[in-house]
Amino acid sequence: PSDFTLRGRASAKVVIIGAGVAGLTAAYELGKAGYDCTLLEARGQAGGRNLTLRGGDRVTETSGPAQDVRFGEGVYFNAGPGRIAPWMVTMDYCRELGIPIEAFINNNANAFVHTNGRTVRAKAARADMYGYIAELLAKATNVGQLNRKLTKDDKERLLEFLRRFGDLGPAYDYNGSARRGFVKYPATQNGIQLDPPGSLHQVLAAATGRAITNDFGYEQATPMFQPVGGMDAIVKALTAAVGPERIRTGVQVTAITTREKDVQVTWNGGALTADYCLATLPPHILAKMTHNLGADVTAALKRPVPVAAGKIGLEYGRRWWEIDDRIYGGITETDLDITHIWYPSHGYHSPRGLVVGYYTSDEQAELYGALTPEDRRRRAITQGKKIHGEKYRAELLSDVSVAWERQPHIQGGWARWPAFDSSFTLLQRPSGRVYFAGDWLTHLIAWQAGAMESARNAVTQLHQRVLQSP
Ligand code: PHE
């Protein structure tokens, strides 16, 4: 059963430009309501940024050498989207389409935090910050403003909470905690040897704030999920439901002409006429297309600023992060230019595995993206070695990197609106017979859920119009 269904059937012809997640979702929903959809995709395959790479695949960028993916059997790399929050509509499509999902570990206490050249376990970084903050606040409850603000009961209750929050001692002091882990786990021996924390000064100087709050956001809160076997399970399921024969790949649309009774879409070597058009390309690419939708549409399309983003997949023949470091899934946060290291949330204890050696955006992504694939790997390894040591280089089997700003027909990780102003609302509505969709037209930019929500919004409007037209 579907949570979303267009009510009432129609039979209009719709040409959808772009077979990414927005285009596929739109075709799927319109198809359920009886529409005749054709998807025109400039790339060699559907999916857009929902790209899962496996052995035998090839990655080509707008410049620089192509990369052949040499991963072993069963190894995959989600080069685009990698996690889904449970409240997102993406989960509804997984359910509706029968796509098996599994937990994506977004927060792992046993992963590392690497800041200012030092590596600590995430659990230690958290225990120390929470501990000292709790101690400071406990001491401050009796002074000044706070003293005036709190009743006697409030104070007692706050202290009781702070004792738990920071694992404080009897005098509300933080002196380290078993939460940080042990020098050596006592097991059968008597006596617990705790690893003492640094001083408050040292802990503050470590600047772990971003690292330990990474999953505090609404969109990033644990638990998160991923499709079993690769994110492109969503693309495959949508493609199968839409009908692969409706998707024409390698078709790069050059012009859109909206007319009184129909719309014409042209490409090098062909043209297609339909009742309606849904354009799902990134705004910065749509803005360059020939069209008769008006200068205000072009101006609006030019507003979102494309942002660079990139990832590197590092394949290893031994899952040393599990065996040596006891890291099963999750993310090491760093203040290095790699930003994060992601460990796989699946295939535990299997022979091989793939670590995401960097996941960057903005300036850091531009920096990596400008390098050759070989130099990206070298740089990523040099950085990762600071955390994981020589095995990070020595045990590497193969790698592949994707710089989204260099991906043909995509040219960006995502796009950012300087303001959600009248340009944003203008493109929410059709221009003649042309509708727009994509994550960039929502408040869920850089999420598949944004693409899906936007597709639903566009097809709902289109369908209402068709039902109302004589
Ligand atoms: N959805 C992407 C991610 O989870 C990019 C993103 C990050 C978007 C954080 C919003 C907030 O990494």
Image (tube, grey):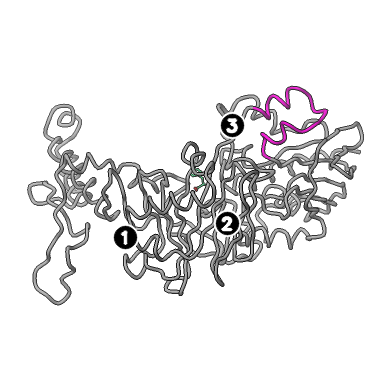
Residue 40's x, y, as percent? 79, 48
Is 365 displayed left or right of 99 in the figure? left
Mark 2: give few (<14), some (14-19) or many (20+) Cα within 10 Å. Answer: some
Residue 298 is a magenta residue:
yes
Residue 119 is a magenta residue:
no
Label 2: which secondary element: helix
Look at the image and tell me in which quarter the N terminus lies.
Answer: bottom right
Q: Earlier in the sequence, mark 2 or mark 1?
A: 2
Q: Nearer the viewer, residue 55 or 189?
A: 55
Q: Magenta part of the protein: which range?
A: 282-302
Is 34 displayed left or right of 459 in the figure? right
Q: Nearer the viewer, residue 356 or 450?
A: 356
Q: Which mark is residue 110?
A: 1
Residue furthest bottom as drawn: 188
Q: Nearer the viewer, residue 417 or 373?
A: 373
Mark 1: give few (<14), some (14-19) or many (20+) Cα within 10 Å. Answer: many
Instruction: Return the residue at label 2.
Output: 91
- Find the distance from the CA under tag 3 to the CA under tag 2: 28 Å
- Find the distance from the CA under tag 2 to the CA under tag 1: 27 Å
Is the distance from the Cβ of mark 2 to the nearest ligand 1 atom less than 8 Å? Answer: no
Instruction: Return the residue at label 3.
Output: 305
Q: Nearer the viewer, residue 338 or 226?
A: 338
Q: Amino acid at mark 1?
A: Asn
Q: Amino acid at mark 3?
A: Val
Look at the image and tell me in which quarter the C terminus lies.
Answer: top right
Q: Is residue 142 above or below residue 242?
A: above
- Find the distance from the CA under tag 1 to the CA under tag 3: 37 Å
Residue 144's x, y, as percent? 14, 27
Is 256 displayed left or right of 201 in the figure? right
